[in-house]
Image (tube, helix red, strand yellow):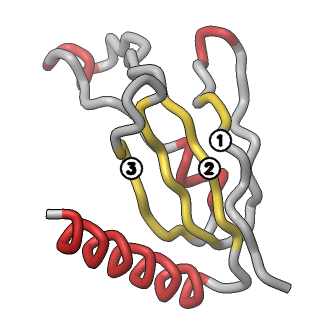
Amino acid sequence: MIANWSEWKRYPRASRDENIEAPISPGIYEVRHAASGALFAFDAADNLAQALAKISAPPKSLTSWFGRREAAMLPDLEYRTFSTTTRANARIAAARMIDRRETYMRGAA
């Protein structure tokens, strides 16, 4: 069976008690800015749900490193996932996708 990308979903905001809907299996994830479609994050992971949960914006100030954590404001994001059977398969698929993108960009330039 050929795996496919999931549908694009809005990245949840903790302030609204939203949750990530992603498999706990290995695979690839892609996160993009909702308005422009620009790539925000792309990687292979052992656990897609965990990897997506760790995505955050850098701290706004030094005080946030020392206990006074403010909710990090992420831009309006969307994400999708591509499940694989193993982390090795996820890395291979990610490398192929990166190669395809680079080949496309060379031809488009």
**Residue visible at 73% across and 68% down?**
4
Q: Is residue 103 above or below residue 45?
A: below
Depth order, front residue of 104/63:
104
- Residue closest to the far right: 1
Which residue matches tag 2?
80
Which residue matches tag 3?
41
**Residue visible at 66% across and 85% down?**
86
Q: Residues within 10 Å of mark 2 (few under 14, many from 20)?
A: many
Residue 99: x, y in percent? 33, 81
Which residue matches tag 1?
8
Which sits earlier in the primary sequence, circle 1 or circle 2? 1
- Assess whether mark 3 and mark 1 are in contact (beta carbons under 8 angstroms): no
Depth order, front residue of 53/44:
44
Q: Is residue 25 above or below residue 7?
A: below
**Residue visible at 76% across and 58% down?**
23
Under mark 3, the amino acid is: Ala
